[in-house]
Image (tube, rainbow, N blue to C red):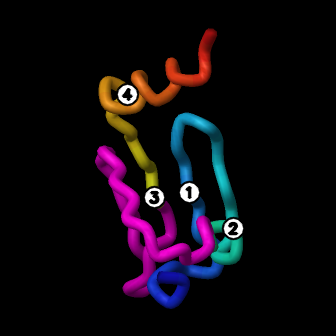
Amino acid sequence: MLALVHEDFVYLDAMGMQKGRESIRGIPAHGRAIRVHYAAHFTFKDRLAIREEAFFDTAVLMPFAQQGEG
């Protein structure tokens, strides 16, 4: 994935902004499936992704957030 993004890559979501290719390394490989419901808008420069804006489906995420309450 890192080979597909520009060195000045910017990632935006509801939690904030991350800048730079190395900032998107993410979760280390663990062999388990992860399912995420979201839409993303990408901007490209020189055939590489320079920006991603992620919009997560809050209706799907809300039950997970409420599990920790109480």
Q: CA distance from mark 3 to mark 2?
A: 13 Å
Amino acid marked by disc 4? Thr
Tell me which residue sits at (61%, 37%) in the image.
15
| Image position of 18 with respect to 4: above or below | above
Closer to viewer: mark 3 or mark 2: 2
Mark 3: give few (<14), some (14-19) or many (20+) Cα within 10 Å.
some
Q: Position of residue 36 (x, y in %)?
A: 35, 50
Q: Position of residue 63 (x, y in %)?
A: 40, 23
Q: Circle 1 is placed at which residue position?
A: 11
**Which residues lie in the magenta part?**
26-51
Q: Is residue 33 magenta?
A: yes
Q: Earlier in the sequence, mark 3 or mark 2?
A: 2
SS for callout 4:
helix
**Numbered circle sitting on residue 58:** 4
Q: Return the residue found at the far bottom.
A: 3
Q: Circle 2 is placed at which residue position?
A: 23
SS for callout 2:
helix
Residues at marks 2 and 1 touching, judged by CB atoms closer than 8 Å: yes
Q: Earlier in the sequence, mark 4 or mark 3?
A: 3
